[in-house]
Amino acid sequence: MQMSESINWAWAILFARLVLGLIFFMAGVYKVFQMGPLEHAHTFFLPFSDTFLPVWSLWAMGVVIPFVELIAGGMVIVGFRTRDALVALGFVLTVVTFGHLLKEPLYEFHTHVIPRLILVLFILFMPRETDRFSIDHLLTGRQGQERINPS
C-alpha cells in the first residue's frame, strides 16, 4: 500500500470511529446521567415483560446497556481496545434488533441499526495497523519498540 493510500485509510477509520463512538457515547451519557439507567430499563425494556423474556433479564439489560454504550463509545472515539469495544457495541445492536423484531417483526432497520452496523463492520474489517490515529496504534508501536530494544 502506498503512503498516500495508507494515510487516506487512516483518516477514513478515524472519521468512522469518531462518528460511531460519538453516537454511542452521547447516547450513553444521556441514558446514564440524564435519564438514569433504571428509568432507561423501565422505559425501553420493561414493555417486553409481556413476552417470554424473564423480567430480571429485562432489568439487567436495560441497566447495563447505557454503561456499555458510554464506555465502549468512549473507547471507540479514542481508539483504545477498539476491537473489544466494537464487539460490545455489536452485541448492543443485536439486542436492539432482537427487541424490535420481538415486538414488530417487520421493523425497518435502515434508520437506526444499519448505519451503526455498517460503521462497526467497516472498522472491524480494516487492518489494525491502518488505524494510525488511535491509542491502540500508539501502544502497538511502543510494544514493537520494546521488543526491538529491550531495556
Image (tube, rainbow, N blue to C red):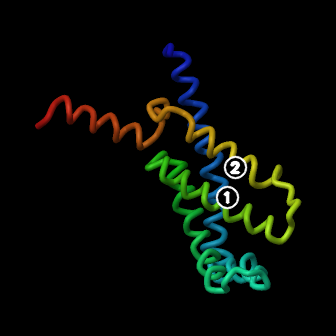
Q: What's under tag 2, amino acid-wise?
A: Arg
Which numbered dot is residue 28? none
Compared to residue 38, the image places residue 13 above or below, namely: above
Nearer to me, 22 or 117? 117
Residue furthest out toward the top: 2
Q: Is residue 40 left or right of residue 100?
A: left
Residue designated by label 1: 93
In the picture, residue 125 is in which quadrant?
A: top right
- How crowded pointer 1 is (Cα within 10 Å; few <14, some 14-19, many 20+) is rated as some
Q: What's under tag 1, amino acid-wise?
A: Leu
Q: Position of residue 21 (x, y in %)?
A: 60, 51
Q: Position of residue 90 (x, y in %)?
A: 61, 55
Q: Secondary structure at mark 2?
A: helix
Residue designated by label 2: 116
Compared to residue 127, the image places residue 32 above or below, namely: below
- How crowded pointer 2 is (Cα within 10 Å; few <14, some 14-19, many 20+) is rated as many
Task: Tell me the CA gap for discs 2 and 1.
Answer: 8 Å
| Label 2–label 1 contact, CB within 8 A | yes
Nearer to me, 10 or 100? 100
Compared to residue 69, the image places residue 46 above or below, namely: below
